[in-house]
Image (cartoon, rainbow, N blue to C red):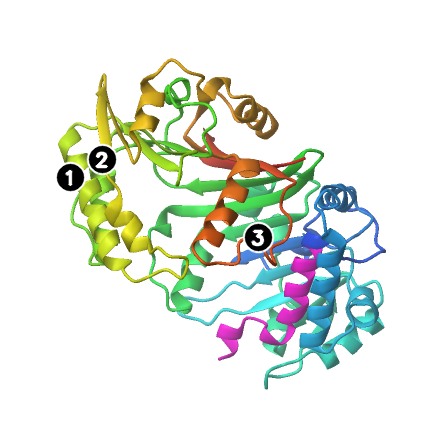
Amino acid sequence: MRGRRILAAGIAVVAAAAVFAAVGFGSDNGAATALGGGAEVAPAGTAAFVAIDTNMNSAQRQTLEGLLAKFPGYDTLVGKLQQGFEQKSGLSWTNDVKPALGPEVDVAVLPTASGGEPDAVLLTQPSDPAKLAALLQKLPTSGGPTPVSAQVGGWTVVGDSQAALAAVTGATSHLVADPAYQDATGRLERDALVKAYANGAQARQLLSALGHADTGSGKLVWAAGDAIAAAGGLKLDAFLHRDGAAPQTYHSSLLDQIPAGALAVVDFHADPSTDSGAQAPGSPIDTALGNIASTLGGETAVYVSPGSPFPSITLVTHPSNPQAVLDALNDALSAASNSAGGSGTGGFSLGSILGGLQLSHTQVGDALVVSTSQQAIDAFTGAGPKLSTDATFQDAQQASGMPDQTTGFAYVDLKDALPLVQGLAALSGGTGSSGMPDLSALHTLTAFGSGASDGVERFTAFFVVS
């Protein structure tokens, strides 16, 4: 169906622009302007809008190039991506696509009436309009119609139907003047690699038209986000405006108890009152995980520590019923073991690993500590170095701007965790690092919620690249 294709005839350009924006391809021409200019012609009430920087001369693209240069084999990867794109599409990136792109490529998912089918358009200001026209004639259409285009307000609009074009060219009010869009994008960085916006009401209609049930997005007013290349890494920001109370921030007391050297940490405040109750029908594992969530309480952390032969996993929580937590964890292990049977090609199976795990636990004040390793519990209760003084964690916290109080955070020591994951993959019979890109430049990942301002929640993720 036309609505379900959502610009199927032109999606190759969108996908290519997004991928090559991430790895360093783009247009060589175009003046430096604030990303998101297509909102000047997109209709007001647009369901979703994404703007991608495709200007190789922009400051953001130059910073991204500097980051990517730190990854060994980056140039080889770019060459393979270009070759694969050209073989699959039958197009030349250099001669057909690159000259047809402007300094940015925007995609607008058009507003739909209740029950109507979604449609989308591509917006750009091509460096060479004739090249864009020629490209549209060459695009693989999978049996669909040839893309059509029109000019409006200095922008070229590309769609798969005249009706889609008319929705843009005939618009009397535009997204750039929409108060919700202004509020959302006013919180984003002016210079970014990618900017995105979604209208809550229109997004619900879009999901309904695509056959997806509303899964709690009814309170969403709008959402927005961006990706920014910084000197020390890549930053992702997201903003959510929802009706109802926003989660409260808290200071993590567990940072002074979790041992230094943790490979990964997820810390959050568990409220059993929001997780308990009847569980929807699902697999035994889903049911078991739901039961665990309903038993947790207060500040809760799950973290992974180095261990032999496998890393240890530790849970710290402040439950009202510690025994209920232990029972739920054992039920989850049993369900996982039963559902993951079979032999692994590397001499062991996931089922045998899960079935062989023995949980150790202890009570520390009002905190319950449960781990797959007694050594990990001893490290938690001992006087050794803690995560709050871990130099790698401190550097990640500073680079990401993580505040002292958050609504929850996650941290991954990628420099140590990635080699471990590759080693475990090889041990289980996988290819390990063979054929994988060299990601040794990735140092850490930190993600956190920094609370609400004016009813708008903010979330940040930062990849440190060194």
Helix, strand or loop at disc 2? Answer: helix
Residue 455 position within the rendered picture, expressed as x and y whole percent measured from the top left: 44, 34
Marks 3/2: CA distance?
41 Å
Discs 1/3, front: 3
Residue 306 placement, left or right of 319: right
According to the picture, the residue beneath numbered tag 1 turns out to be: 327
In the foreground, 18 or 282: 282
Residue 459, image x, y percentages: 49, 37
Residues marked 3 and 2 touching at CB (< 8 Å): no
* Residue nearest the viewer, comparing 454 with 264: 264
Q: Is residue 262 left or right of residue 288?
A: right
- Vertical order, 376 against 49 (above or below): above
Amino acid found under the numbered disc labelled 2 = Pro
The correct choice, above or below, for 378 with respect to 198 in the image is above
For badge 1, the amino acid type reads Asp
Q: Label 1, secondary structure: give it.
A: helix
Name the foreground residue: 263 vs 220: 263
Verify whether residue 164 appears in magenta: no
Label 1, label 3: how far apart the Cα atoms are: 38 Å
User: x%, y% of residue 225?
Assistant: 56, 45
Residue picked out by circle 3:
433
| 149 horizontally vs 443: left or right | right
Q: Earlier in the sequence, mark 3 or mark 2?
A: 2
* Stretch in magenta: 1-21
Give SS at disc 3.
Answer: loop
Res 131 → quadrant: bottom right
Q: From the viewer's perspective, is the residue at label 1 or at label 2 nearer?
A: 1
| Circle number at residue 401 | none
State the residue position of label 2: 272
Amino acid found under the numbered disc labelled 3: Ser
Dominant secondary structure of the residues highlighted in magenta in the image: helix
